[in-house]
């Protein structure tokens, strides 16, 4: 019996694979290595003492995916595989719809044919757009996301809910806020591919001297210090929530359709400048920055009400912002050492 983890060598995928193995699940990874590297598999083995089964397949290739289901008794799936760069999604909408949705549908075809349940979907708080009230809970009305990336997440949720209802299956939609940090070992983290779009990887590279200075996208927002506010959740806490969500589906002995939805955040907001300051204090480094114009499509503020996950998954975020940012610096030091090898 195995759990299929698509995108399992990616940032959130690799940390979730570690937690799955730590909880004695057998893991089968399918990852096309478009946004990850093979050494992450070696490091997962170093962290856990177990090497997950790995297929370097593109999920859009039905015949390859079928081989995986033929070879393994898949009992559930955690689906991370997706392109996720908000800005790039505006320039390449067809690539994003094709990659993010065709791969999802191919997996669901296999689930349908083989009567498999227990599907966990990597969704995002972006489905709420700029919510009218804070904190954001699971009943907060959805808004059509501005970005194509966000639309693929919202469409993915719709496809999965129709799948669950039509075929009486169990699914869980996990709406992440802003994942940050790295594994405490410093062996896995957010791989910087190209220029980081997200805040924390850019802060990391600025502190490391890879980037000259951080562009702070706007300080004229209606917030305490004028910079935008987000809910930054530590990656290992987020990974543990996936194991809890999977366990809940698999332990649900009923014949009922299950559609779980959970907001996964810390419940606290932090501004851009607060993150910069916390990074500097946590790691005793400087992060030079300049204030720039707002970034198109950015919302002002988003932070979660994560009570439902605490209640129903017996899970809550435990890592403080500064502690999470310390792990980021540990990961950067590992990457520096790798380059010197
Ligand atoms: C956070 C804040 C920026 C970079 C998106 C997706 C979300 C998830 C995470 C994939 C914003 C500011 C950023 C920089 C800056 N997707 N910023 N300078 O946009 O909240 O969320 O990425 O995992 O679904 O919507 O995250 O880290 O890009 O930005 O000032 O160089 O930091 O303006 O206010 P975002 P982010």
Image (cartoon, rainbow, N blue to C red):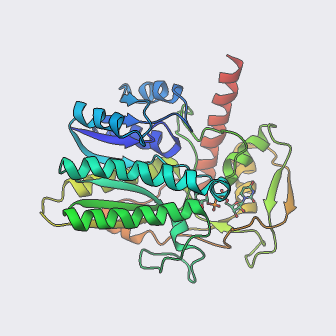
Q: Is residue 184 above or below residue 272?
A: above
Q: Is residue 276 above or below residue 295?
A: above
Question: What residue is at 29 percent from the left and 32 percent from the top?
Answer: 67
Nearer-the-camera pick, 190 or 121: 121
Nearer-the-camera pick, 326 or 53: 53
**Quadrant of the frame with the C terminus:** top right
Can residue 334 be seen here? The reply is yes
Question: What residue is at 70 percent from the left and 46 percent from the top?
Answer: 196
Can residue 176 be seen here? The reply is no
Horizontal and vertical percent position of residue 164: 26, 63
Question: What residue is at 57 percent from the left and 68 percent from the top?
Answer: 268
Instruction: Find residue 130 and report its image quarter.
Output: bottom right
**Quadrant position of ligand 1:** bottom right
Horizontal and vertical percent position of residue 74: 24, 41
| Residue farthest along the top direction in this orientation | 341
| Residue farthest along the bottom direction in this orientation | 132
Please state the total of marks drawn on the protein image: 0
* 326 left or right of 315 in image: right
Horizontal and vertical percent position of residue 293: 84, 66
Q: Is residue 336 above or below residue 15?
A: above
Nearer-the-camera pick, 84 or 180: 84
Instruction: Find residue 160 and report its image quarter.
Output: bottom left
* 205 left or right of 237 in image: right
Nearer-the-camera pick, 180 or 299: 299
């Amino acid at each position: 019996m195995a759990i299929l983890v698509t995108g399992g060598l990616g940032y959130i995928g690799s940390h979730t694979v570690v937690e799955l193995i730590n909880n004695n699940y057998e893991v089968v990874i399918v990852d096309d290595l478009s946004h990850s590297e093979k050494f992450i598999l070696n490091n997962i083995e170093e962290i856990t003492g177990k090497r997950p089964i790995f297929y370097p397949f593109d999920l859009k290739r039905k015949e390859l995916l079928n081989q995986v289901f033929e070879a393994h008794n898949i009992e559930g799936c955690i689906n991370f595989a997706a392109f996720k760069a908000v800005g790039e999604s505006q320039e390449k909408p067809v690539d994003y719809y094709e990659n993010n949705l065709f791969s999802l549908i191919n997996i669901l075809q296999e689930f349908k044919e083989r009567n498999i349940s227990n599907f966990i979907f990597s969704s995002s708080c972006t489905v709420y757009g700029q919510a009218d009230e804070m904190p954001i809970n699971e009943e907060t009305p959805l808004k059509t996301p501005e970005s194509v990336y966000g639309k693929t997440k919202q469409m993915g949720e719709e496809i999965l809910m129709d799948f669950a209802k039509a075929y009486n299956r169990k699914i869980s939609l996990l709406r992440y806020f802003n994942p940050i940090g790295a594994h405490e070992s410093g062996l896995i983290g957010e791989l910087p591919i190209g220029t980081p779009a997200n805040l924390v990887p850019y802060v990391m590279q600025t502190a490391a001297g890879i980037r000259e200075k951080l562009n702070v996208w706007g300080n004229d927002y209606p917030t305490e210090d004028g910079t935008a506010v987000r809910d930054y959740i530590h990656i290992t806490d987020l990974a543990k929530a996936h194991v809890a969500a999977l366990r809940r589906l698999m332990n649900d002995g009923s014949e009922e359709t299950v559609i779980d939805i959970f907001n996964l955040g810390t419940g606290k907001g932090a501004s851009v400048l607060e993150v910069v300051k916390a990074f500097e204090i946590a790691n005793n480094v400087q992060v030079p920055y300049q204030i720039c114009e707002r970034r198109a499509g950015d919302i002002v503020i988003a932070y979660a009400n994560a009570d439902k996950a605490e209640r129903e998954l017996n899970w809550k975020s435990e890592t403080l912002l500064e502690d999470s940012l310390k792990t980021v610096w540990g990961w950067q030091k590992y990457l520096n050492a790798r380059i010197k090898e």
